[in-house]
Amino acid sequence: MKKLLSTLLMLIALNTAFAQSNNPDGNRFPVRGFHLDLRNQVMTMDALKKFAVKLKESGMNTLVMEWEGTYPYEKHPMIPNRYAYTKAEVVSFIKYCNDLGIDVIPLQQSFGHVEYILRNERYKEIREDQKDFSQVCPLETKGDSALFTDLYKELGTTHTSKYIHIGGDETYLLGHDEKCRLKAEKEGKSKLYIDYIRMLCNIVIKLGKRPVLWADIALKYPEAIKTLPKGTVFVDWNYGWDMSRFGDHQKLMESGYEIWGSPAVRSSPDNYNLTTWEKHFKNIRDFIPVSEKLGYKGMIMTSWSTSGIYSTVFESSTDIADLYPIRHVYPLSGFNILFDAYKEGLNSKQPLNIDDFIQKYCKEHFGFNKAQSKSFWTALTMTPYEIKQGEVASPTPMSVQQLLDSNHVAVKTLYSLKPVKDLEEYEHFKLMADIRDYYLQYQVIEKQLNDSAFKVAATPVVIEKLKTLLAASKGLNDRFSLLNKGYLNPADIEYENEVRNIKIINLYNRLSRKK
């Protein structure tokens, strides 16, 4: 009994010492950080370093880097993409962050969201499906998964963090192939998922690191959670929904694992033509206090540059020519206001007061008074609705033309306000509003063309409208390039301008029969 008591006291002391060493300033979240998604919109190294300084100045200590194809894997040279950094650049960046007191945690997707790896025939044997290359088959990998052992080892040579984030979210194809289907029928999908994740966690642990993974699938199969190594960290991502959206949240809380929370400054349905500003502000306001109350040990703000789902261009029935990310959003360069809202939400003992924050931010950054700040916020949050298959996804009936008219008001409001400082930052808001206006004008045209009452004789008028839009797009492209010069890779800026305009260009070419 005395030995048991002594052991318990020792464990309590060790836990206390560990908490103090990882939380020297007594902050409610020992891990306070940001997640950068480089699957799309690759930042320059100078921009990354400036961002690290911004994290430091904001009281943050962690940066989760989802390098994807920008990491220069040497043993697997088919994985890096055209925007990949050099190993020297990665090492220099991590040292730079470490000198600032920023821990850089590498995120390597290792189950789902691995199209960029599985597209290569070298890895065809471990695909869950030979048409949808998004997911690894958990039964086709070797006992120690040679691929991910290699990748984690390489990450370990450049990253000094004690963590490796293994991903593990949104494994939509779980149990899809025949082997996996039979195992799932016999033992359950949870067994498929957890056995594979446990293997990955053990690879990380053998490297002297702690595994980190997204919590959504584990929440779906809570009966298997406790079989993972005890050093595992779960990241509970929540972008404004019920805590039990993915499964019984209480089961996760009872598991005894360390948990970090994760809101978002960019997420679905955001794209180039829509930013759901109010949703993200409310997410910061609501989720951070809940995470603190639940005893989460970390808070990592995500900022998704894309959905993580790809459209595949096949060159034959078995081989692919390219992958295109589905859903592009405006670059992170235009989201300083949400970054600062997150900083305030982290550092304040009270939930974020959105109205007060907007007024304070607008006064400090743009020199706006209370009325001007209110007008600015109204313009940002006016009719934030998607268009799906030609219909406006609004709570009450609204036509595409009405949505466009509403955005005209938002654009006019933003242009009527005259900031006296931080003019470049304000230009991002104006450009986003103009891009949305450009998109909605196109949607009105497309709606007209798809109407059964449309007369072919009206086609020349439509072509002229499209020509006018395309002429306007050149100005938008130039503004986008100027505002993101030095922030995004130059080739990526060109690519983003192409993607944003491709639908309009294609329709114009179709209707005008342009050769």
Image (cartoon, helix red, strand yellow):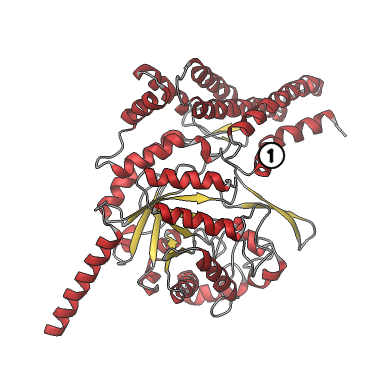
**Residue 468 horizontal side relative to residue 39, left or right:** right
* Residue 387, position as x, y percentages in the image: 58, 34
The residue at the point 40 percent across, 51 percent down is 33
**Residue 414 horizontal side relative to residue 57, left or right:** right
Toward the right, the furthest residue is 515
Q: Is residue 498 visible?
A: yes
Task: Check the image and report above or below for 477 versus 302.
Answer: above
Front residue of 186/304: it is 304
Q: Is residue 280 visible?
A: no
Classify mark 1: helix, strand or loop: helix
Q: Count every numbered label the image shows and give the total.
A: 1
Q: To which quarter of the image does residue 317 belong?
A: bottom right
**Residue 135 horizontal side relative to residue 229, left or right:** right
Q: Quadrant of the N terminus?
A: bottom left
The residue at the point 50 percent across, 60 percent down is 107
* Residue 313, position as x, y percentages in the image: 73, 53
Task: Check the image and report above or below for 161 versus 238.
Answer: below
Task: Check the image and report above or below for 307 versus 367.
Answer: below
The residue at the point 72 percent across, 68 percent down is 121
The residue at the point 53 percent across, 26 percent down is 427
Task: Check the image and report above or below for 395 versus 309.
Answer: above
* Residue 348, position as x, y percentages in the image: 27, 41
Front residue of 319/122: it is 122
Mark 1 surroundings: few (<14), some (14-19) or many (≥20) residues within 10 A: some
Q: To which quarter of the image does residue 244 belong?
A: bottom left
Q: Three-letter amino acid code at disc 1? A: Glu
**Residue 438 horizontal side relative to residue 398, left or right:** right
* Residue 350, position as x, y percentages in the image: 25, 40
Front residue of 358/466: it is 358
Dot 1 corresponds to which residue?
A: 494
Q: Quadrant of the C terminus?
A: top right
Q: To which quarter of the image does residue 330 belong?
A: top right
